[in-house]
Image: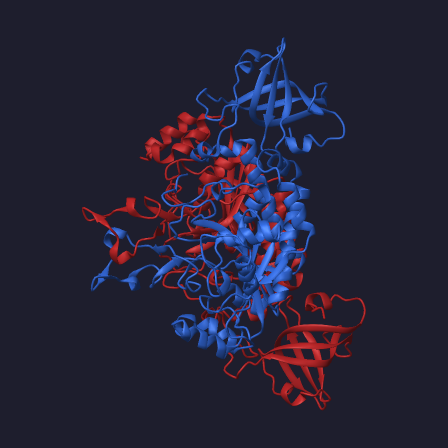
Chain colours: A blue, B red
């Protein structure tokens, strides 16, 4: 007999004579000659109410079932006379698949997020985390759908790399050596004997590789894991996270911004229309301002200002900040929050940052003191996107590399792409988990990743 | 002015007055008062023919353009009087974006795959590799589409892990230590001081984590990179590759097989209908039997035999093999090829392998000597899928772990899932690159990955 999923059953237009469902008991309560079971199968937030009558052969067993137990139910789906649900299932047969002893950690009450992180293997069985991971799935799909409709090709850039995308952050080392017995020459580890024959690291960005593919396929994007070995225990940082990196041949910085803004709007709209029930949970219980913030993001044009104007706005705000700001200094989180949450009250694109401290691949502006880059800041989560037009001029690229002390030979293939049919191109990176936080109001990155990796935390 | 992509233009129903295209020159040849340019922008295999008349202002520059140069062209698209194309572009303006000096490695001739691997940053600009990476993109989309339509949720399982999925293969070590100066205690590396506070590795499979999510969300799948530190230089092995791992609550082994077979058929059919031009290139130039093999895979039911019967068939075949076979021994590549390419002449599902040498998580059959697992073998590529019904019975699982000397505490969360609401469930893993090889006839895994990682090879 074909098993039905609860998300489909609840959308049924008419009663159904005989259905089979399988899932986990959320709650059970007794009436005179019945037991009411709320069954969840993970397909949606909603439960299916099961009516288990005392005429069932194994009713004595059913009466003792507790939260978390898994069962298989055959029954007749009919209109529910009770409140809160359209349909209920009048069970003709209930088969117990797995019990749930009384030390089951997820009893019927609200658990706090700190506790739930310690049982990350079980928390997807709660309403909140079930909703989170369903949204995460749909958001991933929305990304692929968006780019495919625009003829972008999805590319897989290497996770293990020998290049460092010019110091985007601290990197993890990878080795096939037993760390206790790595071969040494003159006290230095002999990487020529290692698996790859040289030092290998976990990627911090697929950009440089994606550029090679954009200069062949036109428009491409990556969507994959990236890594930072930064020992920062904040709510917004994880050692392992997913990033989306589109790279577009023939795009300049402003076309890049247009795409990025449209992308965020489109993802937001997709999730609101495809995950409405799951989003409601967050709007009701996690962040009361969620819907209005998402609505605004979808409909209003993002503010756009140069870094230089941003510095002026902040310095003329009459507010005191912890960090001083003047041309050349980095915008701190406090400055970004002020711009997006207070001054503009919505998303902001800040562009043309100072050349100094910018990576070699960002296109130098004609003023020779700024580069053609941009960051997109969102209320509550801060920087969600960083992007730039890439330096396509061979001579400028090479002199920037020299300036920054980079060895051209390490990047011979990258330099090659500017020698042969170079073309203007641009791209950006979107932090996938930050987008999840923005869409749900969840304030800790650890709660939008099934099994987060952070300093001293590699459990599960 | 809006830039058009060549894939869209070539599908046009009518001439177009003014279009803008940008791309790279594949070839250029001169006629009396014209230059014919074949322009490719990566959006499809086909080029757009550009007619550059000597009346163009910069014709002297255009006449010197060579293969690989990038240009921007405005012109009128009209019916082509020439053979081989429906449309051509009569240029009114050509702007040169990037030259391509004569040492450009991709001249107009066929290059062999070994050479092209040394310029992996440029090979996507060839017909064959452009087609490969477009198919790779569409295959990824087909995977997401397939599962979404069946209400599966996409989950991201950890890449950095402390568990080893029970020795699925040699693993890479990850550390934030400088390998020259890792802190030691009694000559042993002190991992308590490392980033995660314990030994960390690159995942070989997301299965154990995915099981936790399946037991909450019902049906889930992973699609992400996995790693093997195996020093094997074969055509079918890479150190970094992508895997698809669906995991389904309430599925038994045979439902698992049904899904896996349907999945392969559906992916094959999707690629044949959505990438027909790119596939034709492979059918014409790479593998003459490609289309008939794919057709057969889509339409015929996969053979299904037990491991025990497979051993009998092989031993009764009258053929000599390099490796002896008897119950308990592993099927070698030569045996698999015999079964799928000769004996059955098509895909084969081999199931119920011996318990010994099987991982602890495979469900023990009632005969106590075999497990509820299966492999799917495809002609030319061999094993494409491995899967099993998972052991859901707490007592059997624990005794299997003891038998294999595994420490229960290392897997406390996994064991937990059998204590609380355990349920029958199954899953499998499909090697994404193997599927690419099957669909294109490409015989070396290095040629379906943009920048492959293999022993001593981490370039680009």
Horizontal and vertical percent for residue A434?
53, 48
Horizontal and vertical percent for residue A42?
58, 33
Quadrant in the picture for residue B402 = top left
Depth order, front residue of B356/A26: A26
- In the rendered view, does B176 fall on the left or right side of B292? left
- In the rendered view, does B255 fall on the left or right side of B30? left
Q: In this view, does B68 lie above or below A222?
A: below
Q: Farthest left residue?
A: B186
**Rendered residue at 46%/72% (across/down):** A413
Q: In this view, does B115 lie above or below B446?
A: below
Q: In this view, does B235 lie above or below A402?
A: above
Depth order, front residue of A206/A52: A206
Q: Where does the C terminus of chain A fall, quadrant-wise? A: top left
Residue B265 visible in the shown view: no
Depth order, front residue of B141/A29: A29
Residue B97 visible in the shown view: yes
- In the rendered view, does B318 fall on the left or right side of A41? left
Q: In this view, does B249 lie above or below A432?
A: above
Q: Where does the N terminus of chain A fall, quadrant-wise? A: top right
């Amino acid at each position: 007999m074909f098993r039905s999923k609860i998300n489909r059953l609840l959308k049924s237009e008419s009663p159904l004579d005989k259905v089979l469902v399988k899932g986990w008991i959320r709650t059970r309560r007794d009436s005179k000659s019945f037991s009411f079971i709320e069954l969840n199968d993970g397909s949606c937030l909603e439960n299916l109410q099961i009516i288990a009558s005392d005429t069932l052969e194994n009713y004595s067993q059913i009466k003792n079932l507790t939260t978390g137990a898994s069962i298989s139910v055959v029954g007749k789906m009919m209109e529910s006379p009770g409140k809160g649900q359209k349909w209920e299932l009048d069970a003709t047969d209930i088969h117990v698949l797995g019990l749930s002893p009384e030390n089951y950690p997820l009893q019927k009450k609200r658990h706090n997020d700190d506790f739930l992180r310690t049982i990350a293997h079980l928390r997807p069985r709660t309403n909140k985390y079930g909703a989170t991971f369903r949204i995460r799935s749909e958001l991933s799909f929305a990304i692929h759908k968006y780019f495919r409709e625009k003829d972008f090709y999805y590319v897989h850039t290497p996770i293990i790399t020998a290049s460092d995308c010019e110091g985007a952050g601290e990197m993890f080392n990878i080795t096939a050596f037993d760390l206790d017995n790595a071969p040494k020459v003159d006290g230095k580890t002999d990487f020529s004997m290692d698996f790859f024959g040289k030092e290998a690291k976990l990627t911090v960005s697929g950009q440089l590789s994606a550029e090679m593919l954009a200069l062949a396929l036109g428009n491409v994007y990556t969507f994959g894991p990236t890594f930072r070995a930064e020992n920062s225990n904040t709510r917004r940082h994880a050692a392992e996270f997913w990033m989306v990196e589109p790279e577009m041949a023939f795009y300049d910085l402003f076309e890049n911004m247009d795409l990025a803004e449209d992308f965020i709007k489109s993802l937001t709209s997709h999730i609101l229309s495809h995950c409405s029930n799951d989003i409601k949970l967050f709007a009701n219980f996690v962040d009361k301002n969620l819907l209005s913030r998402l609505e605004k993001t979808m409909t209003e044009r993002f503010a756009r200002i140069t870094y230089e104007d941003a510095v002026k706005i902040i310095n003329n705000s009459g507010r005191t900040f912890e960090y001083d700001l003047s041309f050349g200094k980095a915008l701190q989180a406090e400055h970004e929050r002020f711009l997006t949450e207070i001054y503009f009250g919505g998303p902001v694109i800040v562009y043309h940052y100072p050349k100094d401290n910018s990576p070699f691949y960002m296109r130098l502006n004609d003023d020779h003191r700024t580069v053609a880059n941009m960051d997109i800041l969102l209320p509550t989560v801060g920087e969600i996107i960083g992007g730039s037009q890439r330096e396509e001029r061979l001579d400028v690229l090479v002199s920037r590399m020299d300036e920054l002390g980079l060895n051209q030979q390490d990047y011979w293939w990258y330099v090659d792409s500017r020698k042969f049919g170079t073309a203007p191109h641009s791209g950006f990176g979107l932090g996938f988990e930050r987008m999840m936080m923005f869409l749900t109001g969840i304030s800790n990155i650890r709660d939008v990743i099934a099994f987060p990796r952070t300093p001293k935390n590699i459990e599960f």
